[in-house]
Image: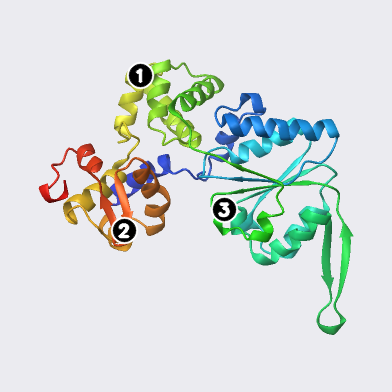
């Protein structure tokens, strides 16, 4: 049972869009450095290119930028690309890492003119830090309160002009005052299969791996529209090819490796299929509440809602209703289970 749970967690990690511990170095290796190297997000790239070029021509610090969209689509990468295109330094942190006012004050006072401050998961930043950022973003000033009680006084420190870039997967969790202080907001969308294929081929070249076009298409088709997952699957398929196929990443080797990882042609893993089977077989197609579903599948509610459910809904395999989750006709077809007549 312990080995089975460990295997479940390993497969889930492959299809988890969040970056995994120890994966940062691999992620940086494959990261594009320039806008022209970035594959996908064509409309966003065009707007971002104009935004950056205009700032360079005016020799001004660009407005603050907010990127939002699902994890693994390139928000951090685009932030570093802006830094490269402008030829300035970038300081990176995250919302949860900023616990005290002193944390953000230390970062802000050490910025140089034109620098970029990148805050990932900005929606998880506490309100106290957020209030410190208001004058910093708007007036390039830092207000520090010295002392307590009646003798307390505020000292204002001038800051160099900088650009703040925020990244979030939950735009609705940002307060309106903070959102309004970003001059440019860009939304990242899931990638088309042909775009993911290009990303896989590019990553394979960087890794020094031979790959067939058809093999790249296979990896791309099972990557849930997410470059981070595509690169992660490429890494595992490459390991398989080196051991079983003399290093050549062919279509057959890719299919065999992904079959071994139990990731099917639609990018569903074992847990995705278990969720569908549980709704269909145990709960007669639903509806079933998420807490009950989590208990029946031995999965965490947060993982169900953040990892599995969005993709199953995007494929039209489940519906979310006021009474709970319901399996659709496509789910029955995918699992090759006959649909009851009264649900047809």
Mark 3 vs 2: CB contact within 8 A: no
* Residue 178 rendering spot, x and y as whole percentages: 68, 57
Instruction: Pinpoint residue 281: horizontal percent, then vertical percent.
Output: 17, 51
Q: Position of residue 232 (x, y in %)?
A: 46, 34
Q: Label 3 vs label 2: CA separation? A: 26 Å
335 in relation to 175, above or below? above
Residue bearing the label numbered 1: 251
Q: Earlier in the sequence, mark 1 or mark 3?
A: 3
> Which residue corresponds to the image point at 48% horizontal and 33% vertical from the top-left?
191
Viewer-nearest of labels 3 and 2? 3
Q: Residue at x 49, y 21 (%)?
A: 201
Q: For residue 87, say whether it is visible.
A: no
Quadrant where the C terminus sits is top left
CA distance for labels 1 and 2: 36 Å
Q: Is residue 72 left or right of residue 136?
A: left
The correct choice, above or below, for 207 with respect to 104 in the image is: above
Q: Nearer the viewer, residue 21 or 118?
A: 118
User: Which label sits in the foreground, 1 or 3?
Assistant: 3
Res 50 quadrant in image: top right
Numbered tag placed on residue 123 in the rendering: none
Q: Residue 114, relative to residue 231: is it above or below?
A: below
Q: Which mark is residue 171?
A: 3
Residue 46 position, x and y percent, is 64, 29
Under circle 2, the secondary element is helix
Q: Which element is circle 3 on?
A: helix
Q: Earlier in the sequence, mark 1 or mark 2?
A: 1
10 Å neighbourhood of mark 3: few (<14), some, or many (≥20)? some
Query: What residue did someone put label 2 on?
Result: 294
Give the spatial CA distance, label 1 vs label 3. 39 Å
CB under 8 Å between discs 1 and 3: no
Q: Residue at x 28, y 47 (%)?
A: 4
């Amino acid at each position: 049972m312990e080995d089975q749970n460990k295997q479940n967690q390993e497969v889930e990690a492959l299809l988890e869009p969040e970056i995994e511990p120890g994966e940062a170095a691999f992620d940086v290796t494959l990261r594009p450095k320039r806008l022209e190297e970035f594959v996908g997000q064509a409309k966003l790239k065009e707007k971002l290119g104009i935004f950056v070029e205009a700032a360079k021509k005016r020799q001004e610090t660009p407005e603050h930028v907010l990127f939002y969209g699902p994890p693994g689509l390139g928000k951090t990468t685009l932030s570093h690309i802006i830094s490269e295109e402008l030829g300035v330094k970038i300081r990176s942190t995250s919302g949860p890492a900023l616990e005290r006012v002193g944390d953000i004050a230390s970062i802000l006072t050490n910025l140089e003119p034109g620098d970029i401050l990148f805050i990932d998961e900005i929606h998880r930043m506490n309100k106290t830090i957020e209030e410190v950022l208001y004058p910093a973003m708007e007036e390039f000033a830092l207000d520090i309160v010295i002392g307590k009680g009646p003798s307390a006084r505020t000292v204002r420190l001038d800051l160099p002009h900088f650009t703040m870039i925020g990244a979030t997967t939950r735009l609705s969790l940002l307060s309106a005052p903070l959102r309004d202080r970003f001059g440019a907001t860009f939304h990242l969308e899931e990638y088309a299969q042909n775009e993911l294929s290009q990303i896989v081929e590019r990553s394979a070249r960087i890794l020094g791996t031979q790959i067939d076009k058809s093999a790249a298409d296979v990896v791309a088709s099972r990557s849930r529209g997410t470059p981070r997952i595509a690169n992660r699957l490429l890494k595992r398929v490459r390991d398989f090819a080196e051991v079983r196929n003399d290093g050549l990443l062919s279509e057959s080797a890719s299919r065999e490796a992904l079959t071994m990882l139990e990731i099917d042609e639609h990018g569903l893993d074992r847990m995705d299929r278990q969720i569908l089977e549980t709704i269909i077989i145990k709960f007669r197609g639903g509806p079933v509440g998420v807490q009950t579903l989590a208990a029946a599948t031995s999965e965490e509610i947060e993982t169900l809602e953040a990892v599995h459910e969005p993709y199953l809904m995007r494929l039209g395999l489940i519906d979310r209703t006021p009474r709970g989750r319901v399996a659709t006709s496509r789910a029955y077809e995918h699992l090759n289970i006959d649909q009851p007549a009264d649900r047809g």
